[in-house]
Every structure is written in C-alpha cells, then in structure tokens.
Amino acid sequence: MKNRKKDTLISYAWSSPSLILIALMVVFPILYTAYISLTNMNVYHWFDFTVVGLENYIKALFVFDSGFLSALFATILWTVVNMILQLVIAFVLVSLLNIQKLKLRKLYKTFLMFPWAMPGYVSILLWKTGMFNTQFGLLNQWMEKLGQETVRWLSNDVSAFICCTVVNLWLALPFMIMIMDGAMQSIDRSYFESAILDGATWLDRTRYITIPAITPIISPAVIITVFTTFKQFDVVYLLTQQAGAKTGSGFHTILTYAYENAFITNNYGYSSAISIIIFILLLVFSAKYQMKEEGDR
Amino acid sequence: MKRLLSILLCACLLLSLAACGEQTLDPDEANKLVIWHDKEDAVIAALESYLATAVPDLEVVFEKKTSLTDSLKLVGNDPSAAPDMFIFAHDKIGVFAEMGILAPIESLLEEGALENYLPMTLEAATYKDTLYQLPLYFETLLFMYNHRYMQDEEVPTTTDELLAYMENNTGRGRYGFVEQHSTAYYSAAWIHGFGGSIIDDTGVPFPDAQAVKDALNYHSQFVALMPGETEYNTVNTLFLEGKADATIGGPWMVPSARAAEIDLGIAPMPTVDSTGKALAPYSGVQGIHVLNFAAEQKTEAVKKLLSVLTAPTIGIDLALASGCAPANSLCYDDERVANDELVQSMRTTAEIAVPMPNIPEMDVMWTVVGNLLTDVNLSGKDIDDSFDAALAQANQLIDAMK
Amino acid sequence: MTKKQIKERVGLTALNAFFIVLCFVTLIPILYAVSVSLSGQNSLLSSDFSFIPKDFTLDNYKEVIFGEDILTWFKNTIFLAVVTVSLSLLIAVPAAYCFSRRRFPGRKTILKCLVLLNSFPAILSMFAIYRLLRPMGLINHRVGLILVYTGTMAVFSLWNTKGYFDTIPTEIEEAAKIDGASDIQVVLKIVLPLAKPSIITTALQVLIYVWNEYIYATTFMTGESKYTLAAGLNSLQATEMTGSWPVFAAASITVSIPVLIIFFMCQKYMTSGLTAGGVKG
C-alpha cells in the first residue's frame, strides 16, 4: 500500500514539469477566459471591470443564429473533407516514398517538406496573390493561355471552399507525411519479408500489416490535427474574409464567423463568453467521439 | 485530482496578480521617451534627425511595432512594457480614450500652440471635446491618373463623365478607372458624395439610409467596369503597370508610381451629378499620442517634445521627406511645400474630406460596411436586403460593445 | 535483362517521374516567391509572370542579409529554438514515459483532459498569458517566450511521444531491469533510441512552431533587436503600402532555408532502432 503511494508520487514528480507548464499556458488561459466571460470587461471598463454574472452569455445567444449554424455545418464538412484527404494522400505518398529502390527519396521528402518550412501567413499570401488573384494570379494567366475564360476563384462559396482546402492541404500535408513516414519506418521489415514469402499482395500487406502498425503511432498527431483543422482560422480568414480584401465568398468557419460577429467589438467579456461556448460545443463533440471510440473497442 | 491542483495553482496566480505593486521611476529614465509607431522609414528618419538637434537632452527612441493597437490594448497602462507615446492615425482615439490610457494633450501644450493648425486636423483629434492627439500630418485619397492614357482635358469633373470614360476605355485587360471598390475606406467617398455617412457622431450607423442605398446603387455601375478584386495589391499593380488609366489612391502610392515611371497627374475628386457634391474621402490624421503614466511621470520631457513638434519646421521636413501634408498651416508658406503638387492637392482635398470617425463604434463599422459592399458588389445580392442585414449587424455589434 | 527487371525499371522511372512532377507542383508557390525575390521589379504581381525572373538580380538577398537586422533575428531565433526544443523534450519524455509505462490514479483522467484541452479556441489566450507573465516580469523577456512556446507545444509533445512509447514492446525494458538497470538508464539507453522517429517528429514540430510564430513574438517583445525571424519578417511586410515585395520574398526564402537543411539532415535518424537488428525476435 505504502509502495503504491510512493509510486504514484514518483510518477507525478516526473510528469510535473510538463503538467505544470500545461496548466500555466493552456489551462490557465481557459480559466481566465471563463472568468473574464463573467465580467463586463470592454472598452468602457477596460481596467475597472466587475463581475456581471451571466449577462454576456445571454447576449451571446444572439450570435448563435442561423448564420452560426451554417458556419458550424461548414466547419464540420471542412474538417471531415480535410482530414480524409490528408490521411489518404499522405498514406499513398508515404507508401510510394518507402518503396525500397527509390534512391532519391530523401531529396523528394525534403522538397515536399518545403511548405512546412515557410511561415504560414507568407504561404497564404503567396497563394492568394500569386495563384488565385483574378487579374494576375498564375491560375488565370494559365487559363488565358489555354484560351479559357478567367475565373474568380475565391468569390463563390463552393470554389472558395475548394481553394481553402487546397491551401490547407498544402500547409498540413508535410506534417502528416512526416508523422506517417516516421511510423512507417518503425515497422519491422521482417514482417513484410515473411508476408511476401507467404504470397501476400501489396493490398494485403497494407491492410494487415501497415495500417494496424501505424495507427497507434499516428493517432495522437491525427487527433490533434483534427482539432487544429476544426479551429482553422488563418487559411479561411486570410484567403477570403480579410477586412479590406474580401472576395465575396460566404464560406465561414465557426471561428471566422465568431471573429466577425463578436471579437471585433473589443468587448472581452462578450468575446470570452463566445469562446467558452465554442469550447463547450467542441468538448461535447469530442466527448461523444471518444465514447463512441471506446465503445468500438 | 490533478485538475483540482491546477485550478488551485491558477487561483494562486490570480491572487499574485492582484498583489502586484506600482513601479517607481528611475531618475535616468525621466529624460528617455519611447515612441511606438508603424510608419515609413522616411518619416521616422526625418523626425529623428529633427529631434536630435531640437531637443538634444532628451533621449527619444522610436520603435516600430507591427501590431501596435493590439499591443497597446494589452500593455496600455503598464509602464514596464508600454511606450510613453505613440504615433498613429486618429481613428483609434475613441477606443483608447475610453479604455483610459490616453492623456489629454491640451494641458501639455503651450498656450496658442495650436492656433495655426488646420481645423480639420484638430477636429479629427478631438474626442468628446477633449484633444487626445497632437496632429503631425494627414492623408486623404486623391484622384490620380496616368498622363499617357488620360489627357488633362479628358479628366472627368463629374462622376457621369467618369462613367462615360470608363465605358469607352475598359475592356481587353484594360481599365479606364480602378479603385478598391468594396472596402469601407474607399466607398466612404461615394457615400459622402450622396450626402450619407457610415456612422454619425453619436454612434448611430447609417443615419441616412436612402443616401447609402443610392450610393451603392449608383456605384454598382462603376464596379461592373472594374476587376472583381478589391484588395490593395491588385488595384495598385493595375495602375502601376499602366493597365488602368486612373485610380483613387493614397499618397503612399506616389513613390511607387514615380519609381514605375508613371507620368502621374493628380486632379480634384469628381462631383456626383445628382447631388452636386464632390466625392469626399475619409482623411486620416497622423499624430502623436501621450499615454497617461508618461504624462504624469515624465511631464517635463513630454512637454518639451510636444513643444518642438508644434514648430512648422518639422512639418516642412516631413512634407519634403515623404510628401506628407502637414497639419500646421504655417508649413504651407514654405515655397518648396507650396510647389509640391501632391501636398497641395491633399491640402485642397482636406477642405472637403471627412475625418474618419474616431468613436469606438466605428471599429466594427469597417467590417459591417465591408460585408455590405461585398454582398452587393461581389456576390450580387439585392441592395435593400443587404442593407437591412448590414444595419442589423451594425446594431447588434454596437450593442455588443457595451 | 529479364522481363521482371524491365518491368521494375519502367515502374521505377514512372515513380521518379511522378515525384518530380509532384515536387514541382508543390513548389509552384515557392518558385513564385523565388522568382519575385530575384527580380528587380518591385511588385508581387505581374501580368506576364515567368519562373525565370526578369532583370535578374541578387540585390534583394544582399539587402536582406546586410540591410536588415536579420542576423540578430537569426541569433534570437536560434537561441529560442534550441532552448525551447530541448526544454520541450526534457519535460515531455519523462512525463510521456510515466504515462506510458506506469499506472497511477488520475492517469486516465489527465490523458483524456489533455486531448480535450485542444478544443479551446486560443484566439483570446494572449490576454491571459500576458496577465500571467507580467507579474513575473517576463514580458519583453526571452524566458517568457520560451515558457509560452514550450507550454503551448507541451500537450502535443507529451501526447506524441507517449503514443509512440506505447508501441514499443516492454519485454526489453523488463529484461534490462532484471539486469539491474534503473528507470533512467532504461529510458536513455533503450527507449529513446527506439523512439527516435517520434522524438524527431516532436522536435521538428516544436522547432517549426518557434521558427514561424510571430504573434506572441511581436506583441510581447518590443524593439527590433529582440525580434525573431518570423516577427521581423512580419514587420517587413506589415507596411504593405510601402514595403518592398522582392525583399520580403527574399527574406521569406532565406528564413525557410535553415529549416530545410535541418529536415534533410534529420532524415537519416528517422528510422527506428527497432529495425536496426539486435532486438529482433
């Protein structure tokens, strides 16, 4: 009994630096936001704010209108589409890159990592002005050369969604490729060798060896990516919704929607309430998902 | 259990925040003034060299800050992290004054120091009857054209003439006229030309609804003849590459136009035929703001600095260095300033220009108007419906500020 | 040459061709930046763009390297990156090992909570973190940034390494323990070498985050001498009205190169020790 207590203590002692930092930099902001959401901290009470109770939450309910609902559906669709494409494309590419006789694989991998090495906002700016711009973008220059009509790529909901997805994939795939590659490298080659001797096809090997072997390794990164995709702001905002450079698309994720309908008010109490509501919404989603996953096991 | 612990930990931290005390001022620090800005290098260089001779005993440090307004919201009353002063356009004065970080300027100035300032600049710098900024220079949008394609006698004096010119000169990759048609800053000129406004002094959005709708309706004919892109780079490049004959742009476009060897002409804003009013753009007054604690703790240094900044010399320097239009009218007596076509046209436009509203409510209107314009111009939605939606959004957001 | 060999050769050529095309397509936006950075015209846009720059010039790179404070920013970034990456691994590995191997009350709950923490939209976190760092005097201080970066990435680091540790069979460790090795020895000598791929992916992810993060860096640090590369780069383009696009493009490329070199060098460590023989069977 005493031993177990000591064991627990040791475990916590070793984990404490990590857990304390998480408490400070991740948990504290959440608690602080929750606290601010109960106050009237806004332009008129910036430093002398007082607790006003649930007032902000009552006000916040007006933001969760039909516009918010459609943004929520768009966000779910966005997350699903992006995650499926990311996983499938990354898996195919990594499988190809791991073909034994491919000598230049290191070079290819390094090039494919390039989008990751650029600061995100630079990449988005390059895509927006260099590729999608209606007047000067490469895409429209090519369309003209092919004798086609030029296209306003970012101006309607569907094409803006597709363009944002392309850019998001371009930004996110390098990480996914690297994680999968790391996982793939850790599979013991001898499994494949004996499988080949047994006459297993590539499909069989993928299904019975590769996928079961990499799933536990990549799942933490994948789960975190699901959250980042869900909370994606930069790609959608900078490509289509940026103040002064709007393109006419109505595609909003919950965060860009909340930004335009709350965060710009300089009312921290109110914005915090909205953040907390979004947080709770996501919590419910992920809790449901987790329970389902546990049920599957 | 761990959750509980971390909650406790955070509670402790919160308490320690409250316990944090005031900092005392180091005597050496009293003559050091840190000024944040987000201006061009030429402007700052002119200020630095002027101040080095005008107030040699002050140590003035200019720090370029890219996220200036956001940072100020964070650190505004924290002497250890905030600057003493900052240079910014006047349109955030309301926000910062309400937050309580700006010091009123008038008591820091000598008597009569503002006598010769252009009234428009002082009006812009005043919020709730208090002056919060010492204006340095101002900017307005200007009607610019390329002499190579648009002859002086072709320059439209009315908007109908402009439309006719556009119809005759637009097509096959060329544009008669371009502007950032679906952004609030640029469209304000059209709304003002129809007698409307985005927000009034008391914070009521779109006080004259019909004027705004008329402006949108009339302006949409122009938008049809412009590219479907409203951001700065596209419009700028079209004009600089000689693909657009005329544009409405700010003085910041002039250096690049000269570098691109455009034979630049500047003309008065055209008049709206149906109202007889000229397109009246927003003006932005750039000036120096003093933070509360600096005004309290470094009063002498701040006074000295402000005093030398009211002299016409620095205005002339700025005008010559980067074509800024000085706020002090005495600067225009200088022959070199008087002969600068760009500065003079801004001075003329200043007569009709409307200072950007500086009330906090304006902050959300940029987005609201941007959405309205995008809906009408780019998504082709109905004007009345879009306007109603915008008005509702404006009211909701303004309501949410409080 | 047998038929099989020919078939293999054709397949390999096709595969190489596929990757060359893929790399080219992936790099188009970046080649765009490269071309802009090498051109003498001051525009990000042009109506007749080609990948071969007109008025070829290296002036923009010269200006980046000698004109701006880029060397100072580079030093700052290297310092932040090295410290943050080391610190992240230093705190993540022991925690991950505990969570992977030991069973203690609260373990499951904490693990679950850590995932859920990701659901918080961190847009407003800046304010809270400022309130946290200010009383400690860490605003405008590198240590503040290091703590913010390490803390922000800590959930990922812990999770990612823990996930990988879970897949390493425990038999080897048990054998070593019977031979008298301590926990620390087991981690250093057995677990870490086996977990190389995940250690490297974790380290790279933290590195990239530090390398490209500019919001905290510009808000919490004052004065260009304290900027990181990303923050400096952001201030270069922030003055959109007057900024020079070719210089900005050149700076963006310059900033990315060190990361690419690190990528390239890391690849040989990406293979887990598990396949290197010795522990097989």
Image (tube, coloured by chain):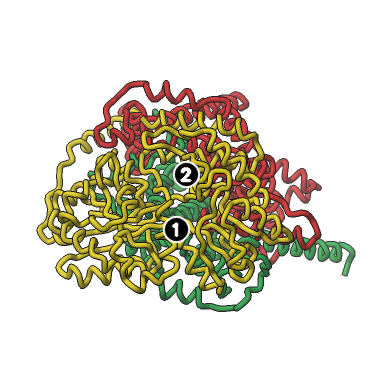
Chain colours: A red, B yellow, C green
Give the percent coordinates (x, y) of residue B130.
Answer: 24, 43
Disc 1: CA contacts within 10 A as few (<14), some (14-19) or many (>=20): some
Give the percent coordinates (x, y) of residue C114.
Answer: 44, 35
Give SS at disc 2. Answer: helix
Residue shown at 63% from the left, 48% from the top: B223
* Kind of residue indicated by mark 2: Phe
Residue denoted by label 2 = C156
Give me the disc on residue C238. 1
Q: Is residue A181 above or below residue B311?
A: above
- Labels 2 and 1 within one chain: yes
- Ranked by sequence position, the earlier of labels 2 and 1 is 2
* Kind of residue indicated by mark 1: Ala
How far is mark 2 from mark 1, CA to CA? 31 Å
Closest to the observer, C236 or A216: C236
Give the percent coordinates (x, y) of residue C189.
Answer: 44, 54
Give me the disc on residue A272. none
With B377 as the anchor, is B323 left or right in this view? Answer: left
State which quadrant residue A23 falls in: top left
Q: Is residue C107 visible?
A: no
So how many labels did they put on this image? 2
The chain to which mark 1 is attached is C
